[in-house]
Amino acid sequence: MRDLFGNDTRNILTFKYRALKAQPNAAHIALASLSIPKVLKRIAPQAESYHLITQNVDGLSVRAHKELIDRLTSEQEGISDAPVKAADDLPPSNPTYIIEMHGRIHDVTCSVCDARVANFDSPICPALGEADKGLDDVTVAGSRPSNIPVDDLPKCANCGALTRPGVVWFGEQPLSLDEIDELVASADMCLVIGTSSTV
Amino acid sequence: MIVGSLVGTQFTDGISQVYPAAGYAGEVQAQGGLIAVFNLEKSRGDSDADFLFLGPCEVELPRILGLAP
């Protein structure tokens, strides 16, 4: 049952809440910039493609991608005689180069069927909000049991089963492994960026 | 040439309990690919990397890639 919203609720929602408040940093933006064909050409002239595989579930890589597009296109709008940016000067409209292999904290998935929807509400339902008052106090995250009736937990719009956060738990298979294996098998350069944590 | 970035992991020899991402960098290197590690501090496996940049990645990545805002 720990893979449902009813348990580990405080940990999950505290993280979701903090992830919503977080902003992409210069590293996220730099990695998004590599998806701009002209930038990649300058930094890695022989590169045929660029891919970003993240184990983070905070969604910040995708947000950085969108912010970068907004920034570059609004720069253009501000100047009437600015040269129109070519496709090579902008990131692709969809961030298909990003693989979030451990899922997304802002997704809600069904515990039974394959439904997956983005949900940026925090909390995602009143009962969970009540159980998680004082989310800024991270020291208590997970320390209080949540005895929320199943009836009050969010259900799948598709099949009515209980939903769960769209992240990969320990013991579960990460997402897109076949695609990742193919990329790893053909990569000529790999930037390893991140933590020394044990996960 | 294919360039990849792997975010939020540790570069190890692949025998750690971290599966499967821990082995990706080693796999790329085994087939002749280059590995650049960006991390706050030293960690196991760093000596196998071709390049190692220690410091906050929001500083080091833009600096090394020449993408300073």
Image (cartoon, grey):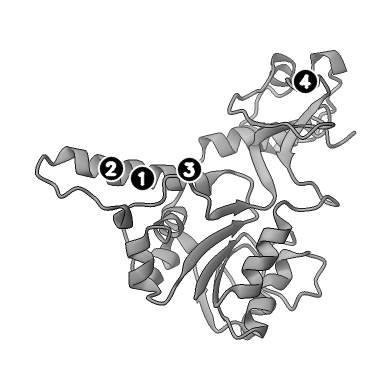
The answer to whether residue B56 is seen in the rendering is no
In percent of width and height, residue B2 lies at: 52, 72
Q: Earlier in the sequence, mark 2 or mark 4?
A: 2
Chain letter behind tag 2? A
CA gap, disc 1 and disc 2 = 6 Å
Tell me: A198 left or right of A183.
right
The answer to whether residue A171 is seen in the rendering is yes
Q: Earlier in the sequence, mark 1 or mark 4?
A: 1
Which residue type carries mark 1? Ile
- How many neighbours does mark 3 have within 10 angstroms: few (below 14), some (14-19), or many (20 or more)? some
Residue at label 3?
A: A63
Residue A155 disc label: 4
Q: Secondary structure at mark 2?
A: helix
CA gap, disc 1 and disc 3 = 10 Å
Which residue type carries mark 4? Lys
Q: Are marks 1 and 4 in contact (CB under 8 Å)?
A: no
Q: Quadrant of the C terminus of chain A?
A: bottom right
Q: Are marks 3 and 2 in contact (CB under 8 Å)?
A: no
Residue A69 disc label: 1
- How many neighbours does mark 2 have within 10 angstroms: few (below 14), some (14-19), or many (20 or more)? some
Chain letter behind tag 1? A
